[in-house]
Structure formats: C-alpha cells, structure tokens
Amino acid sequence: MTFSTRAALTALLLGSVAAPAGAEQVFNRIASFPVAQNLPKGEDKATSSEIITATADGNTLIYSDAPGGTIGFIDITDAKAPKAGGSVKIDGEPNSVAAIGAKVLVTIDRTKDLTKPAGQLGVVDIASRKIEATCDLGGQPDSVVISPDGTFAAIAIENQRDEKLNDGALPQLPAGELQIVTLNNGVPVCDSIRHVDLTGLSTVAPEDPEPEFVNINANGEIVVTLQENNHIVIVDSKTAKVTAHFTAGTVDLDGVDNKTDGALTFSGKLTAIPREPDAVKWLGTDRFVVANEGDYKGGSRGFTIFDRTGKVLYDAGTSLEYAVARVGHFPEKRAKNKGIEPEGLEAATFNGQKYFFVLSERGSMIAVYKDTGAEPELVQLLPSGISPEGAVAIPGRNLLASANEADLGEDGGARSHVMIYELSEGEKAYPMLVSKDIDGKPLGWGAMSGLVGDAEKDGILYAVSDSVYAMQPSIFTIDATKKPAEITSVVRVTRNGQPAQKLDIEGIALDGKGGFWLASEGDSAKFVGHGIYNVSAKGEIKSEIALPAELLAGETRFGLEGITTTGSGDDLTLWMAIQREWKDDPKGQVKLLSYKPKSKGWAAVRYPLDKTEKGWVGLSEITARGDYLYIIERDNLIGDKAKLKKLYRVAIADLKPAKLGGELPLVTKQEVHDFLPDLKNATNGYVVDKLEGFAFDKSGKAFAITDNDGVDDSSGETLFFPVEIKATN
C-alpha cells in the first residue's frame, strides 16, 4: 500500500475543522472507572483490568484481574456514572473472562512450575458472585471465547514459555493446544472437552505451538493465533479438526523510529519482520483481523486482514503508528522494540456500520476503523488509559469499554482503569492537538512543558518539550485557531549546529528579536545544569546564562519551571519560577527569580505555596500579561487524589525582588482559575498530574497544555484547551 493511500486513511482524524453536530456519529469517552474502587474497604494494593466482557443486557462489565487474583464487576446501568460492583476471589490467576447468560466463564492459571502447567475453567454466577463449578484443563489457559450461538466455548491452552530460560528460546515443552467444551445453559460440560492438536503446523517451533488468542465466527469456525510461532490456524468446531493453517508472514517497514535514543525520527528500516499476531477477530465468516504485537522475534507495529486461505487483504504497514505519532502518543522508549505494540482487538456493528477497534498497548490508544470490506477507514483515535489490554463492544447501548492493565499506584501514578465510550452525534473530544507531516513523515511530539503566545498573530503559540527527548530539544509552533489545534512546524534547539544536549527545557518566552528565552531545569546528578538560554528564530543557542553560585548552593533537582519577561530595553527582566523549595527556602515557600540581562543582576522574591495533605505542591509555569504574572500551582497527584491544579496571579507592581543570600520579600497571590474541572471534564478521563503550560495569545485568549511524559508510565494524553479566567487588566 502506498504512503498516499495510508495518509488518506487518516484524513478524517487530522481534519482541521470538526464536523458540525448531527453530521456524523463519533465515539467519545463518557466515563472512567478506577478498578481499585472494587477493593474491599480499607485494602489498598495493585490491581489490574485485562480482559473484559459484558452481560447480555449490557448493564454490567466484568474484567479479569490476574495480579489481584479476582474478577471484578462494574455496574454501568448509568454508563456515565459507573459504580463498583465488587469482585470475586479466584484461587489462581484469572486471565480471561467471557459472559453468557447468567454466568461468566473464567480461565484460571494455576501453574507454579512452567514445566508442569495447570489450569481450570471456572463458572461464576453473576447474581450471587460465587464460583459454582470448575473444569480441570490439564494445562495453562489463556483466552476463552464463547460461540455466537452459545453452545460451546474455545480455550487457548498456551503452556507459555519461560522467558528467563535460555533467553526464552523455543521450543519449551509441554506443548499447548486448543480445547473445545460444550456449554449447557452457559455451564461447561467438563467431560465434553475435545483436544485439538496444534503441533507440527508452524515452521518456527512446530512442536511448541503456544496458542495465544481465539475467536469464533457465525459458522462455528475457530481461528487461533500461535503468536511466537507467527502462525494462524482455523479449526472446525464440529469435527475438532484443523481445516487450514498458514504463516502470518513478514513485513518490510521503511520510515519507522526503531531507536530508543531520546528523539523521534521516523527514518529507520525494518526488514522481514514476523507479524507475530496476538488478538484475532473474525470480520464476518471469510475474513479476520489480527493485531501484530510480536512477542518473540517480531511485531510489525500494525494489523493485518486475512482471508480464510491466508491471503493478505490489507496490511496497515506504518499507517497506524504514524497516526498515533501525530497525536503525540508514540512511545519513544519502546521504539527499539515494537513501537506502539498493537495487542487487543474488538469488532462489532453499530447502527448498521461495521467497526473494528485496534488497541495499542504502548501507545495507550484505541484506533477506530470502519470495516469497508476492502481497505478499512481510520475514523478516530481514542484515549484509553495506560496499556489497554481488552475491549468489549455493547452495540445495543452504543457503548464500548476498554480494560487497561497498568497500575502505577505504588509509584504515585495512575491506577488501572476501565474506560467507557459512547457512540453518538457530536464532535470528537480527542485528540486536542495533532501535528502535520513533514516530508511525508509524522512530526513526532510529546512531553510539552512550556507555552508562550506569538507577539504578532492571534491563535499562534509556541511550546517546548522537556528532557524525555534529550537528543531532540524542540520548539513547536501551534495553530490554536484550528480544531483540533495543529502543530504546524518545529525548530530544533542546537549548539554549534548540533542538537543541544544536557537540556531539560521547561519554559519558553519571546525575546522580542524573533528568538526565544528558554529555561532549563537542572539535575546535577545527571550533569544537567540549571540555566537560561537565548536562542535565535532558527533554534541556535546564542547565549547561555548559568544560575549564580550563591543560588546553586541550595539547589535540588526541582529547578526552573517556566520563564517570562517584563519591561523592555535596559529594564528587560526575566522572571523564572522555581518548582519546589530549595534547601535555603522556608517550608511552603518557593522563589520567583529575576534576572536583568543588561546589568546581569540576579534577585528574587518568595511565593507562598498552598498546603496539601498528600504529595507535594510546586509551580509549573509563569507568564506575564498586563499588570500581572500568572503562575500555575499544582500538586503532583493524579486521578481522584489530585486536589490542586490552579492558576494564580501576582501584581507586577508588588514585585520588589531582593538580592540573593539575604531576606526575600513574600508576595501576595490571587487565585484566578481552578483547572480541576477542565482536567476532569475535557475528555472524561482521570485527572492528569502534569499541567505544565499556560500562555496568552496576542489577543489575550488563554490556553493551557499538559505534559504527557512522552508516553512513559503515562496514558500519553495531552490536553490542550482554552481557559476562561477572571477579568484581567
């Protein structure tokens, strides 16, 4: 498929003008549910939501939580206000669920020694939340799926390899298999289990098939992926015989970022990469789609549609990865391995339109495709939470739900969430910021950490990225007059013509001469100095200003978080916010630094921080407008724990900075905006912690932007939105 064809598939996603209400139906997130809410009262531990299913009436979601050893329930009778439905403790690791009638089937891994795999198929009564029966499977199960007519279930018995043994090399016996079990009113008949031998089919490790995922079509045919073996098998459920099998094949990729090097450069090549599909979904009875995650030696970063003979009808190539990069979700730290890692799939028909959904585990996105019967049409990218694993469609209620497995609560990050989306008429709420292509390749971006408005054009702003992209420090131009806002160009920050290293740019201001002032947050442990940089319009560093010794004596790694200017000519003053208290600061107070380029004089005032019961509070942006300095003050908390994300202002006339080393005056601040409602309601996700950019455009319209940490231990979501604040001078 040509690049022009791929580009056409993303045209709707990247259109500069949103469709008017009523013109089309779109998916938007309407709720997010942290699955930790299903923990017993007083208990706090890591949770996960992996594979998800729904009851026939569409009012209850059920998900597997292998690390927690439970399956959880969510009441979505009111889909916009999901409620905790409790959980059922499982003896073992529940790794897949499938609801049928009043029951839910759960595969249970009870393996203690990978050379002696063991597992069960459990039956849980949905009403009583009790395990009613189990069937011994004689091996380690992975996915389970129920036939469309409800008469049987298919189970992939993976008997997975030990990735620490001989570097995970195959084969590792005993071999896995496919099992087919008859269902009687949703209850498996244990002695009906039929075993389908999958050995001797692939060319990678024919004696060790390791089946991964299964799906069943309306004719009762089962398609099975043998992920590590890069093979696909079709089985007739009536005879329990293999009717077709074929390799998933390889792809050549040109123009990919395949280096984890602190830069987004889509210029690499990958040759003969095995697809190694994970999830699989039938698209009718003659075609199916696979997500090419890779797990052994491959992973082609996309998805493929096959017919039942193994003919490739469509391969995504780089198109999906490019689309994800354009919305700031490309996971640079995974570039060397498998990029965005498509893993999960769902397929369903909504209001007569066939869709399938591709889940990017590392990009933390859901790609929505219309199934045209030929080349699919990418119509949306949805924010998913961290590491989407499974999804379930509920067409009868126009709903889609995703289960996101990562739980970063122990490190202060986001908990595992189930996200709920609704298909309805309206505008796409996400993405809020996209980038143009440059020379036919996506302009990759992320980790936006500072913002400033252009002096001459309304709606034009400049943003900088931080140390996530240490080898590619950048200044991005944003056109906020478009919807979604669009990154139209980029300037790389250079030193002597080479990418400037040892920078952690956290703030940007105009220098009045066509260039910029940049503030870099230092960290002596990483040999990154705290400093100010004046760069030309082309990004070349013209001068570097280090912080004075008397200030650095009390340094911590929480340094400059924003820069702005007041005055002009000889009175030009740079103002910088220090994020948190340094060693010489009273508790609850931070410095606003001033520097006059003409006299090279340093001074400061103290700024009073709000108090918090948990986490810490600090500053993350400073910008001047009229008679005031505007300052973002926030805690470092996320989700339901986030309490403080506010905008304050300080009157410039009241700023009387004193010399460093002596007593510093304490300024008075005035609250002008609470960002929490914005962050909660923008896309109905959880509140992100890093609100790091705020600026006014030429006309005085205010905008804010969040830092997505370069999709590292983050959902990757970037919120960019206008801000209504109290009247200013």
Image: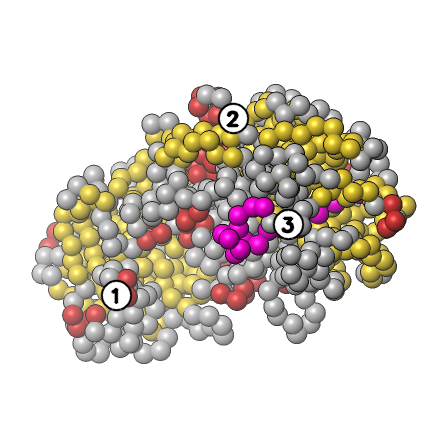
Q: Residue at x 52, y 35 (%)?
A: 274
Write down the quadrant of residue 335 in the picture: top left
- Distance between the alpha carbons at the discs numbered 2 and 3: 43 Å
- Distance between the alpha carbons at the discs numbered 2 and 1: 46 Å
Residue that carries the numbered disc 2 in the rendered image: 9
Q: Secondary structure at mark 1?
A: helix
Callout 1 amino acid:
Ser
Percent position (x, y) of residue 565?
A: 23, 54
Callout 2 amino acid:
Leu
473 relative to 148 in the view: left or right: left
143 relative to 493 in the view: left or right: right
Provide the residue span drawn in magenta. Answer: 153-171
- Distance between the alpha carbons at the discs numbered 1 and 3: 50 Å
Residue that carries the numbered disc 3 in the rendered image: 173
Q: Is residue 307 above or below residue 585?
A: above
Comparing labels 2 and 3, the label whose residue is closer to the camera: 3
Badge number at residue 124: none
Callout 3 amino acid:
Leu
Q: Secondary structure at mark 3?
A: loop
Q: Residue at x 43, y 70 (%)?
A: 616
Residue that carries the numbered disc 1 in the rendered image: 524
- Give the colour scheme of this rendering: secondary structure
Q: Residue at x 84, y 33 (%)?
A: 238
